[in-house]
Structures are given as C-alpha cells and as structure tokens.
C-alpha cells in the first residue's frame, strides 16, 4: 500500500514538472544575448498560501521604493490570500516582452505603487520575465505564477558581472497604434575596484513621508503686493562664495543686498540650486562645486541661512530659485558621491537615459518629468528648503525641456498611451509644476511659488512644453508668474505688445503678474543704449493694471563701474521709476 502511494506521488510530481516546463516557450539566441521568454496568459487572480509569503526584508536587503512592515493585509486569513492584480485606471500598462535583471534586492508589489501589498522580492542579479511597462515607470513581471509589479528603477536589460560584457537586447513594445521592435547593443565596463553600479539604490522617495518627517514651517512669509525684484543668479553668488570664509561671504552678500535695497528693490530671487546641486545643506543634492571646485565639498557655514538672514534684516523678501530639471555635466556626476540619487541614476543602466538624460546641445544631464520618481526627487528638494529655511518663496525659471528631439523621453512616451508627444510633454511639465506648488503649500501655506518662463508664448508652449496659459488661468499651479519680456520695441516681439499679451492670459485672480526686464542688455545694441530703457519699460508696466511689479535680470548688470556712464544713467533713472511703481 505504501509503495502504491509512493508511486502515485512520483507520477504526480513528474506530470506537474512536465506541465510547468511546457508552460514556457524559450527562444534561443546567440551567446551573449538575452533570452526572450513568451509565457501563456496567467489569470489575474491567484490564491496564495500564507506559508508561501516571503518574510519581510529590511530596507537594505530589499528596495522597491518602500518595504512593508506588515506580513499581510487585514483581509488575509490564516490559510489563503486572494490577490487582485487589476491596475488602477490612473496607470496605462503597455505590453512589453523582455528578460531583465534586478540591479538590487527589490520588492515585488501587488500593484505599481510603493504602498501596495508586498508579494515577495527579487535578489540582486535575478532574472525576470517582463510582460509590460506601466506609465509611471514600473514594470509588470511574471512572479509566483502571477503577474505583479516592480519599480523600474531596479531592473536592467543587462546582467552586470565582474567582466566587460556586450549584450544585444531585443525588445518588442506593443502600443494601440503599432508594434515596434528594436535591437540595442550595449557595452558595459566594470572595473576591479568598487563601482557605483554595486551601490544600493535608495528607496524611492515618498514626498508625503518626507513632508511629514520635516514638518511644517510656522514662519510667516514676507511678500509685497507690488514686487520690485532682482535676480541673483549663480553667476553672481559664485564669485562671493568661492573659497570664502563665513565672514567674507556674509560681508559680500550683505553689501549686495544693501545695494539693491538702497535702489528701492524689495525682493530677491536667489539661485540656491542651478545644476542639480545646493547652496545649502541638503540631503538630496550635493553642495555646489562653486565653493571649492569639488562638488559635494561644503563649507563649515550654511550660505542659505546667511543669505536669508541678511535679506530679512533689510526687509527684503527672499525667494529661493531652483532649476528643477537641469542637472550637471558628466565630469561632476562622475565626481559626485554615490549617496546621492542623481549619481545612482547616472550609474544605473536602467535610469541613465530615462530618468536622467544627456543633452548634447547643452552638455548637461537633465531630469525627465515623465517619471513620478523624478518629480518626487525634485519636490523633496523643495520640501527641505521650505521646511528648514525661512524662505518667502520658491522660484523656478524657464529651463523645462532642453530639446524638442523625440529621443529625449521616447520610452516613457511609448508606454504613456498618448499619441500626441507635444501635448503629453506639456501635461508632464504641468504635473511637475502642480506638484511643486502642492509641496510648497504643504510645508508652509504662506510661502509663494512662482515661475519665470520665456516671454515668447509660442516657445513656452511648443519648445519648452510649458503650458503657461493653463497655469495663469487655473488655481493650484502657481502664485505668481514673471515672464522674461527681454525685448526692445522693434522686431517681431515688441516689449509693449508682448506685455499686453501676457496681461491678457493671466485670468486667475490668485496669480500675480510681474514683468521680467533685461538689465543685462543695457549697452548691447543701439536701442539699448538710450540711457533710459530700464526706466522706460518700468514706467510702461506701471500703466498696465494687470501687473503687480517688475523684476530685473540680473544683479551684476545693475552694478556700474566708475567709468560706465551709460549704466550709471540707467540706474539713476530706474531708481526714480521704482519709486513710482
């Protein structure tokens, strides 16, 4: 009897193994290629025994973005858990066939969301069969006889070992309109020393958790109904900061602020992040190389604290100016510590080229706002400024998309479900702007958020993909807008005509309109050498009821040398116009 039972058990095991083997159809390719596996469809409802649930791993052992601290949701009983893999309508899943590899120990989730139930995890280097890409950057994979999700940051097309490897990756992306098959040859070099590819990528940033941890700032922001502002670009700050002691930097910035205050200005827009760096102590961005020449090397003092303090002593409203999408050069990224997310994205083949994209025209790497992880990193940097420092505003300029080239965010667009690249890019930029606004208000309701786009409305919409008309007509995007109307009175975009165009599109009562004026152009052409261009444009803006002031680019352009009689005359006239603004 026992032999019969044993024989039946053996037969059953063989049949089961045979069934599992037949379930996968493997396509064999040349040595060095990734094997593409095509699986039969799997039911979206899987019963999982509690005993099969993997143990909870620490954040060091498993990433996904976050690691669950509970073993099962409340609805799980002692014997069976029914797991639904229906994806929210907020996400679009596009079929995608490939074999990929985990670049770190990463959690597998029920849904493409870091808060979703944890199904299990992948070990670093473990291969998975990918069946789809989610519009938020996650991947759908086959796992435990079902289809679940992994954060795309932690999957790579390439298996990385200790030798140089050449891998041909063939993938197929199916969209509603067409099926695209591409083959990409990639060479990766791994040195014998410890490489950044071996560094654990940090858990995905959860901006809500960060805001909760930082806490709200009770400071009441100082802002004016009529704005008279000056931009202090990194070009202005760097000369003061380079190798400076705390005393030297304090004296320099104090002298600069006293000067603009004496002219009648009441607001300063000061660069605190220009190239994926920080002019303050940050957990998310390395300290600017402007101090010592080495990115990440910071002084014993915090320049932002000093700048805010010196501004407030003079009654100046201080707006922290950041470039959200532009980061830095390859040289600086190579030198950057692996503790920063930017460096981790640069070092990972799955995020270099998607989250972080090189633009040859500018020579910089740029963040792509199409991915939620990217927007959350940007917002995390905003949150720590507003929560930790008594700033009066957050200010961003016109550096949105660096190019109209379709390759910049080709993969993200291909899985977005959209057929209109231009509108899709506008929507992603608008989403970023809206999330920055929300972050600012969550940290301090009194702090303002403003944008300084180009004066050219067509460029904003079709080259930078900044839907300024939407932002100016709808609440929840910004508090103020400062179009850079850096034009004279001749040419295709006359100053006065353009100023009226902007006045007409700012229809939301919650959006303050401020005119950006080009102080840097004084003396550059015949028209800009009249000696009174700045005051003429300021006086004109004061006649338009839709404007609440002016801003001038930039500080150094308003500092005249002893021999510069033209600029001296401009400044004298401007002081009078500011008094009447």
Image: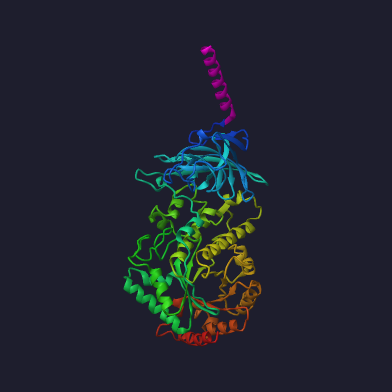
Magenta residue check for 428 = no
Question: Where is residue 39, by image quadrant?
Answer: top right
Q: Can the viewer see residue 477 in this picture?
A: yes
Viewer-nearest residue: 78 or 504: 78
Viewer-nearest residue: 50 or 514: 50
Residue drawn 40% across the image and 47% down it:
199
Q: Position of residue 338 (x, y in %)?
A: 40, 52
Q: Residue furthest right?
A: 177
Q: Read off the magenta span.
A: 1-25
Residue 215 to residue 312: above or below? above
Residue drawn 60% across the image and 80% down it:
489
Q: Position of residue 581 (x, y in %)?
A: 55, 84
Q: Tell how many labels.
A: 0
Q: Can the viewer see residue 359 in this picture?
A: no
Q: Position of residue 407 (x, y in %)?
A: 56, 53
Horizontal relation, residue 377 to residue 334: left or right: right
Task: Give the prevailing secondary structure in the magenta stretch.
Answer: helix
Q: Position of residue 328 (x, y in %)?
A: 45, 60
Residue 146 to residue 9: above or below? below
Residue 381 to residue 14: above or below? below
Horizontal relation, residue 481 to residue 159: left or right: right
């Amino acid at each position: 009897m026992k032999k019969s039972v044993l024989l039946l058990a053996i037969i059953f095991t063989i049949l089961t193994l045979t069934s599992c083997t037949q379930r996968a159809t493997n396509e064999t390719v040349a040595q060095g290629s990734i094997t593409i596996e095509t699986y039969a469809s799997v039911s979206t409802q899987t019963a999982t025994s509690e005993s099969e649930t993997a143990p909870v791993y620490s954040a060091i052992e498993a990433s996904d973005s976050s690691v669950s601290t509970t073993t099962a949701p409340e609805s799980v009983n002692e014997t069976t858990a029914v797991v639904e893999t229906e994806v929210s309508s907020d996400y679009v899943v596009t079929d995608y066939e490939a074999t990929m590899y985990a670049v770190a120990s990463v959690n597998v989730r029920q849904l493409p969301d870091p808060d979703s139930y944890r199904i299990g995890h992948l070990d670093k280097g473990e291969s998975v069969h990918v069946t789809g890409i989610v519009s938020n950057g996650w991947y759908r994979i086959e796992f435990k006889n079902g289809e679940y999700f992994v954060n795309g940051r932690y999957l790579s097309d390439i298996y990385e070992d200790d030798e140089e490897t050449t891998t041909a990756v063939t993938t197929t992306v199916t969209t509603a309109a067409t099926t695209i098959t591409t083959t990409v040859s990639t060479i990766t070099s791994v040195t014998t020393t410890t490489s950044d590819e071996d560094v654990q990528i940090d858990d995905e940033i959860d901006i809500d958790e960060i805001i909760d941890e930082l806490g709200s700032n009770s400071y009441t922001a100082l802002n004016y109904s009529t704005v008279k502002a000056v931009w202090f670009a990194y070009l202005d700050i760097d000369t003061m900061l380079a190798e400076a002691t705390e005393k030297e930097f304090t004296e320099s910035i104090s002298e600069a602020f006293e000067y603009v205050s004496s002219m009648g200005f009441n607001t300063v827009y000061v660069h605190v992040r220009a190239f994926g760096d920080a002019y303050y102590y940050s957990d998310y961005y390395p300290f600017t190389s402007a101090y010592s020449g080495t990115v990440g090397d910071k002084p014993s003092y915090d320049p932002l604290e000093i700048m805010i303090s010196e501004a407030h002593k003079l009654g100046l409203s201080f707006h922290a100016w950041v470039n959200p999408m532009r980061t830095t050069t390859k040289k600086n990224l190579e030198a950057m510590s692996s503790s920063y997310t930017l460096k981790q994205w640069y070092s990972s083949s799955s995020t270099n080229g998607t989250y972080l994209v090189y633009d040859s025209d500018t020579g910089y790497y740029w963040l792509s706002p199409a991915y939620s992880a990217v927007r959350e990193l940007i917002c995390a940097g905003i949150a720590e400024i507003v929560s930790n420092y008594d700033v009066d505003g957050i200010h961003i300029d016109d550096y949105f998309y660096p190019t109209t080239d379709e390759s910049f965010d080709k993969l993200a667009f291909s899985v977005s479900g959209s057929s209109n690249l231009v509108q899709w890019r506008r929507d992603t930029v608008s989403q970023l702007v809206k999330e920055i606004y929300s972050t600012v208000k969550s940290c301090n309701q009194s702090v303002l958020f403003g944008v300084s786009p180009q004066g050219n409305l067509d460029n904003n919409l079709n080259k930078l993909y900044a839907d300024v008309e939407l932002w100016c007509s709808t609440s929840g995007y910004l508090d103020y807008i400062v179009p850079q109307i850096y034009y004279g009175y001749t040419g295709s975009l006359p100053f006065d005509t353009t100023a009226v165009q902007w006045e007409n599109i700012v229809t939301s009562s919650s959006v303050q309109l401020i005119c950006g004026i080009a102080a840097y152009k004084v003396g550059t052409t015949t028209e800009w050498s009249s000696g009174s261009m700045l005051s003429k444009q300021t006086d004109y803006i004061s006649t338009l009821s839709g404007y609440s002031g002016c801003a001038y680019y930039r500080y150094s352009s308003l500092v005249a040398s002893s021999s510069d009689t033209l600029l001296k005359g401009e400044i004298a006239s401007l002081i009078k116009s500011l008094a009447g603004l």
